[in-house]
Image (spheres, coloured by chain):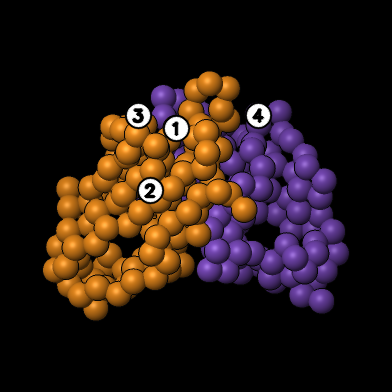
Chain colours: A purple, B orange
């Protein structure tokens, strides 16, 4: 079983739509959680950290459900520039940064 | 940009050869991690270096090895290259401890093709 699993998509949505991605993780002892964004043929970049209480950054909202071991990302009012692959990331070890990445969910925002 | 630089950006090798990839971490960071990203997949953790020592390793064979230098730059070495080693190799630096968040800052990667 993979450490982090995501629906690969693609999610094809019109501009202005609201879209949600989920991912699940297998290690219940995982410590920290993130969403990274990766544009085509570019390096991943941190989008936001995910906290137990849930957190919001502009149009982006992240939620963590430790009991069910899943993480979600909600994007409201989608923009063309949101088109990218969104990677769910879990740090399973408090002592060092061993990050597990999901395979990514591809989002295409259409005019 | 992130301040993490990798070289070379692209290279082509043949099966059985050896390759060395290099990474300069962001100023002030003390930790370097290497990831392998195959086409259509997420990055897979290879290993991490902290204070010039390997500090964690993923499911990669011993022919994947590395170094971290006193200036925190790093090398990834792969011996006896196989076709499946063709991938984007990403270096990520971070600050662990000293108030660091542990956020990974990636370089643009080295794209390796093994023929």
Report how far apart the C-alphas of labels 1 and 3 lie in the structure: 7 Å
Left or right side of A47 for B48: left
The crowding category of the residue bearing disc 1, from other C-alpha atoms within 10 Å (few below 14, some 14 to 19, many at least 20), is: many
Residue behind mark 2: B34
Res. A26 visible in picture: no
Q: Residue at x 23, y 47 (%)?
A: B65
Residue behind mark 3: B51
Chain ID of residue with mark 3: B
The crowding category of the residue bearing disc 3, from other C-alpha atoms within 10 Å (few below 14, some 14 to 19, many at least 20), is: some
- Pick the quarter of the image with the C terminus of chain B: bottom left
Report how far apart the C-alphas of labels 1 and 4 lie in the structure: 28 Å
Q: Secondary structure at mark 4?
A: loop
Q: Quadrant of residue B22?
A: bottom left
The crowding category of the residue bearing disc 2, from other C-alpha atoms within 10 Å (few below 14, some 14 to 19, many at least 20), is: many
Left or right side of A80 for A64: left
Q: Which of disc 3 and disc 2 is earlier in sequence? A: 2
Q: Residue A84 in the image: state x and y as whole percent.
A: 64, 64
Question: Is A74 above or below relative to A27?
Answer: below
Q: Residue A67 in the image: state x and y as whole percent.
A: 57, 30
Residue behind mark 4: A52
Report how far apart the C-alphas of labels 3 and 4 lie in the structure: 31 Å
Depth order, front residue of B30/A20: B30
The crowding category of the residue bearing disc 4, from other C-alpha atoms within 10 Å (few below 14, some 14 to 19, many at least 20), is: few
Q: Residue at x 35, y 45 (%)?
A: B74
Q: Residue at x 52, y 33 (%)?
A: B28
Report how far apart the C-alphas of labels 2 and 3 lie in the structure: 15 Å
Which dot, 2 or 3, sits closer to the camera? 3
Chain ID of residue with mark 2: B
Report how far apart the C-alphas of labels 2 and 4 lie in the structure: 28 Å
Chain ID of residue with mark 4: A
Does the residue at mark 1 contact the one at mark 3 (Cβ under 8 Å)?
yes
Q: Secondary structure at mark 3?
A: loop
């Amino acid at each position: 079983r993979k450490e982090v699993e995501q629906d690969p998509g693609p999610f094809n949505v019109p501009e202005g739509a609201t879209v949600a991605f989920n991912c699940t993780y297998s290690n219940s002892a995982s410590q920290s959680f993130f969403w990274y964004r990766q544009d085509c043929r570019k390096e991943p970049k941190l989008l936001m950290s995910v906290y137990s209480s849930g957190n919001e950054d502009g149009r982006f909202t992240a939620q963590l459900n430790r009991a069910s071991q899943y993480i979600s990302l909600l994007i409201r009012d989608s923009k063309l520039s949101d088109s990218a692959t969104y990677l769910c990331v879990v740090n399973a070890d408090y002592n060092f940064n061993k990050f597990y990445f999901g395979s990514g969910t591809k989002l295409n925002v259409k005019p | 940009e992130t301040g993490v630089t990798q070289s070379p950006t692209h290279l082509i090798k043949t099966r059985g050869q050896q390759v060395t990839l290099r990474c300069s971490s962001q100023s002030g960071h003390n930790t370097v991690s290497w990831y392998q990203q195959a086409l259509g997949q997420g990055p897979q953790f290879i290993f991490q270096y902290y204070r010039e020592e390997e500090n964690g390793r993923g499911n990669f064979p011993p022919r994947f090895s590395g170094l971290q230098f006193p200036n925190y730059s790093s090398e990834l070495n792969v011996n006896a290259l196989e076709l499946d080693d063709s991938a984007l190799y990403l270096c990520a630096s971070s600050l662990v401890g000293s108030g660091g968040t542990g956020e990974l800052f990636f370089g643009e990667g080295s794209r390796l093709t093994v023929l």
